[in-house]
Image (tube, rainbow, N blue to C red):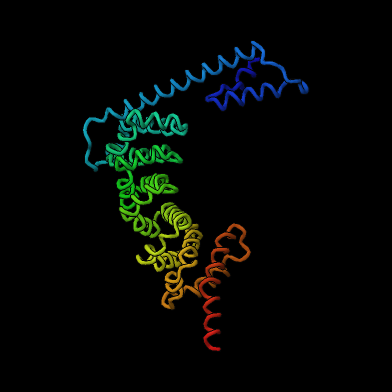
């Protein structure tokens, strides 16, 4: 009996209540004919839903307590002296509050409640520029958690100026974790979000991605290239802007760095810039880039590597689009 009590799961949300009800029904021996819900079952469901509502209210109270901890920050500090404050109890308390909020805000209702409680304004106005890197990246992570697939919160964050601050952190923060988390939050604000994309363009977001791909931070390089590829696939009308800013040449230079996961996304982005876009095709064919030989050599290196199949596919596709057609065109001109 004690073992049953230890393994019993209590539902944390409505989905959990329903799942528990299904499991309880499935435990019955053999199929049972449909019948009206018993009073006992009705009572059980009422009690379960009451507990659920109580739990939801408890979560709101938890968020209020976390915000009270974060609001205790007296006055905005200038950056500096970070090493001297690594063990500061107050900062550890704030980091814990951020982690709890990020976990709670995986629930969409909690994310909306955090917005109503003013938590997002607090993140943007006070913590994205905080002296402590641990608080900066946790604030960016919380923003990302709230913004995912939530247009209402995305619009709110855009309206309070979150995006330019996140782009600045992505571009120049001295802490690598802050840069990666900030880029993640940027991605949550601009992917599949037209207003976010326009704000991204107005703040020269593509240049931030270009510099991110040239960073020594491997995670930042890979995630920058992935976001670029995603935006190109969703918004092919941006090809002109990217080619005009020299993106083809920059991407090829990234391909010449030691092989890493970023190369798969870079090759995918080059395929997008070439497809049905003559200027991108001409840039790739520029003999000064030496792209044809680079692609030929890369294809040889990737042959037989199952884990690199998608990168190989991009590589072969780009080679065909850029150089097989060129050879056909040249042959036609000779005739």
Give the x, y percent position of residue 142: 39, 37
Q: How far across and down, in percent of the image, does residue 329 sit?
A: 53, 80
The C terminus lies in which quarter of the figure? Answer: bottom right
Position of residue 4 relative to residue 79, above or below, is above
| Residue furthest to the right | 30
Rendering coords of residue 184 (x, y %): 41, 46
Instruction: Left or right? Give the position of 134 relative to 229.
Output: left
- Residue 243 vs residue 207, the one in the foreground: 243
Name the foreground residue: 22 vs 263: 22
Q: Residue at x 47, y 73 (%)?
A: 291
Q: Quadrant of residue 300?
A: bottom right
Residue 289: quadrant of the picture? bottom left
| View extreme (bottom): residue | 335
**Which quarter of the figure is the N terminus placed in?**
top right
The image position of residue 172, as x and y in percent, is 31, 52
- Viewer-side residue, 265 vs 49: 49
Depth check: give the residue in front, 126 or 15. 15
Q: Residue at x 48, y 57 (%)?
A: 233
Residue 314 in the image: above or below residue 97: below
Residue 212 left/right relative to 269: left
Which residue occupies 55% across, 84% down? 332
| Total numbered labels | 0
Vertical placement of 87 versus 308: above or below? above
């Amino acid at each position: 009996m004690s073992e049953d009590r230890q393994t019993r799961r209590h539902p944390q949300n409505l989905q959990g209540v329903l799942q528990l009800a299904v499991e309880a029904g499935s435990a019955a021996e053999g199929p049972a004919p449909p019948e009206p819900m018993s009073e006992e079952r009705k009572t059980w469901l009422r009690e379960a839903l009451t507990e659920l509502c109580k739990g939801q209210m408890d979560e709101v109270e938890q968020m209020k307590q976390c915000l009270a901890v974060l609001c205790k920050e007296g006055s905005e500090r200038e950056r500096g002296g970070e090493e001297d404050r690594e063990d500061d109890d107050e900062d550890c308390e704030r980091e814990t509050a951020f982690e709890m909020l990020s976990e709670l805000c995986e629930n969409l209702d909690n994310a909306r409640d955090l917005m109503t409680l003013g938590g997002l304004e607090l993140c943007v106005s006070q913590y994205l520029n905080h002296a402590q890197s641990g608080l900066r990246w946790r604030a960016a992570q919380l923003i990302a958690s709230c913004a995912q697939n939530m247009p209402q919160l995305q619009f709110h964050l855009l309206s309070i100026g979150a995006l330019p601050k996140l782009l600045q952190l992505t571009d120049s923060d001295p802490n690598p974790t802050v840069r990666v988390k900030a880029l993640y939050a940027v991605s949550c604000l601009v992917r599949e979000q037209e207003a976010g994309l326009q704000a991204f363009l107005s703040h020269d977001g593509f240049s931030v991605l270009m510099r991110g791909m040239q960073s020594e931070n491997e995670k930042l390089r890979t995630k920058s290239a992935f976001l670029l590829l995603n935006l190109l696939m969703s918004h092919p009308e941006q090809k002109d802007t990217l080619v005009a800013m020299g993106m083809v040449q920059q991407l090829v230079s990234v391909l010449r760095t030691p092989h890493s996961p970023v190369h798969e996304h870079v090759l995918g982005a080059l395929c997008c810039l070439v497809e049905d876009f003559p200027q991108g095709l001409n840039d790739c064919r520029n003999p000064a880039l030496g792209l044809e030989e680079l692609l030929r050599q890369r294809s040889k290196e990737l042959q037989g590597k199952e884990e690199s199949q998608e990168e190989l596919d991009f590589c072969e596709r780009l080679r065909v689009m850029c150089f097989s057609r060129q050879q056909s065109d040249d042959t036609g001109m000779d005739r």
